Image (cartoon, rainbow, N blue to C red):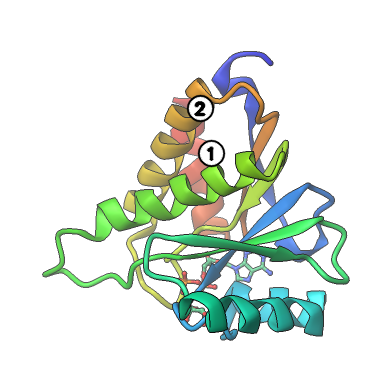
Amino acid sequence: MGMVADRIALLSADITQLQVDAIVNAANSSLLGGGGVDGAIHRAGGRAILDECIKICERQGGCKVGEAVITTAGNMPARYVIHTVGPVWTRSKSGADNLLAHAYENSLKLAVENAVKTIAFPNISTGIYHFPKDKAAEIAIGTVKTFLDGHEQLDKVIFVCFDEENYSIYEQILSS
Ligand code: AR6
């Protein structure tokens, strides 16, 4: 594949509609669903996703912040959903940056392990979890670029923005 920048794309879209190998879900540690993009993914994908999440919970007791698990995408056009858990933003917790980076990195590792070539990320933690959007975008883009540099087998990483503010932040960082 080509240079790292050519393998990154920015899209304003509903992530549940995308025809990619894997879409990433900004889940919570219970893996049992919630609001935001998590709710949208479970609604669009159907019961099969929840069934697999329940099995994973029985096996390993949910998913820790910064970690990731993989399930079917059910009725959606994608093949897999990679569920990761971003950190809740709190001023006092200095570890949040690293945990957000881990959420991206562990999702990418799981993608490679499952022969995923195209993957789409939502803006993890920037909704209900209140992570500052500009800071989150810097971490997301930096982590993805570093990972792509060392993993030629990944063809495309798409950053999917659902709100205009995130889209313009990503546009600016990616063009600079
Ligand atoms: N497609 C793409 N992006 C979306 C979509 C969609 N259909 N819907 C929302 N977004 P959030 P978090 C964007 O709140 O902050 C859930 O209850 C949204 O605009 O979904 O990581 C979980 O169960 C925002 O930019 O996730 C957890 O409890 C981004 O997705 C908690 O929320 C992430 O917002 C996780 O909070």
> Residue at 59% of width from left, 84% of height from top?
33
Q: Is residue 158 visible?
A: no
Q: Which residue is farthest top?
A: 2
81 relative to 98 in the view: left or right:
right
Dot label at residue 171? 1
> Disc 1 vs disc 2: Cβ atoms closer than 8 Å?
yes
User: Would residue 51 appear left or right of 95 to someone viewing this image?
Assistant: right
* Residue placed most toward the observer, 25 or 37: 25
Where on the image, by quarter, is ligand 1? bottom right
The amino acid on which the numbered mark 1 sits, given as a three-letter code, is Glu
Q: Quadrant of residue 113?
A: top right
What's the residue at 82%, 61% (across, down)? 17
In percent of width and height, residue 97 lies at: 27, 53
Quadrant containing the C terminus in the rendered view? top left
Residue 167 appears in the figure? yes
At x 49%, y 22%, the residue is 150
Q: Which mark is residue 62?
A: none
The kind of residue on which mark 2 rests is: Ser
Determine which residue is flagged by label 2. 175
The location of residue 124, given as percent across then percent down, is 48, 61
